[in-house]
Image (spheres, rainbow, N blue to C red):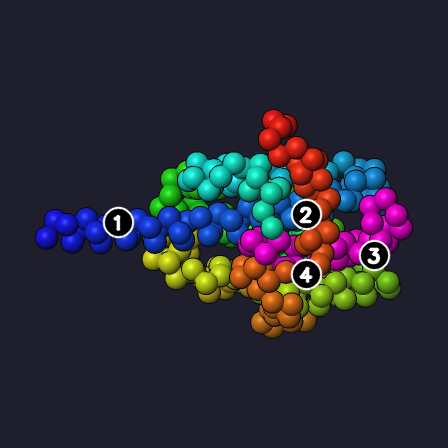
Amino acid sequence: MQLIENGQQAKENRAYCKALTELLYQLADDDFLLAFRGSEWLGLAPHIEEDVAFSSISQDTMGHAAMYYQLLEELGEGDDDFLAHGRKASDRKNAILLELKNGTGTYLEEPRYDWAFTVVRNYFYDTYKKIKLDSLKNSSYVPLRNAAIKISMEQYYHIMHWSTWFKQLTLAKGEARERMREAIGRVWDEFQGVLSLGALADEMVHHQLIDREDKLTEAWISYMKPIFAEVQVDFPGPCKMKLGNGREGIHTNDLEDALNTLSAVYASDPNAVW
């Protein structure tokens, strides 16, 4: 009888660890990719004050990713630098929306970036990230709970920043409002990928790592509906996921390009200590 109980406990522990690592990869990869896309605006933001503010936000977000990768390293998943820079695109768990380019061109050549898309993507993501963090503060995995508490301290300011941009541009007249409406539609077409917890969602909930996907989604929609009313834009309805679910390893060529840039220094000498 004791052997059976021990076997069942071992199986439960393996299931717990699998769900936990899956969740951590999602959290880490989401922040890692969005932080990179934010860093590409350095020197290109609408004005110098925004350049400084957005750089700080992107640095914070990259720091959040680093915290999650460190937790994965502690769980035996490998060196955190490798987890951030050495994994293939097909191994990444980030939502597709977060890997998409800011616009046409590159940082060094004809960077015709879309500020409206950047504002909407960051605002929607950060508001949902706050809801997930509030859930993670009650996670059964104490190190994740502690990380969520630390990250939440910065998240408030990130949301306040993007809220200001979102409301001012959407309430503006003419081209600004039209571009924001177009950006909302583009982000909405992929935001279900951000809301997704992937194939192990039920296991995550079973092990009390995070709340149910539908509960988190409902909380985000409840938060966003008054915002849409305030900026006088009709609420679009259910979010979509047209390009696929990044939680399942489905990605675009934009991710390959991003990883090539992000990992260039690391790939030059993976054994170096940076």
Decide whether residue 5 is among the magenta residues. Answer: no
Q: Amino acid at mark 2?
A: Leu
Please report whichever mark, 1 or 2, sits nearer to the chain's N-terminal start: 1
Question: Which secondary structure, mark 2?
Answer: helix
Please name the residue that numbered disc 3 is placed on: 104
Q: For residue 66, which quarter of the picture? A: top right
The magenta stretch spans which residues?
A: 89-118
Q: Which residue is mark 4?
A: 252
C-alpha span from label 3 to label 4: 15 Å
Q: Residues within 10 Å of mark 1 (few under 14, many from 20)?
A: few
| Residue sitting nearer the eye, 86 or 192 | 86
Residue shown at the point (85%, 50%) measured from the top left: 111
Residue furthest to the top: 273
Q: Disc 1 to disc 2, how far (Cα)?
A: 36 Å
Q: Is residue 167 visible?
A: no
Tell me the kind of residue under disc 3: Thr
Mark 1 and mark 4 in contact? Answer it, CB < 8 Å: no
Horizontal and vertical percent for residue 49?
Answer: 80, 37
- Front-most of 20 and 215? 20
Q: Which residue is mark 2?
A: 259
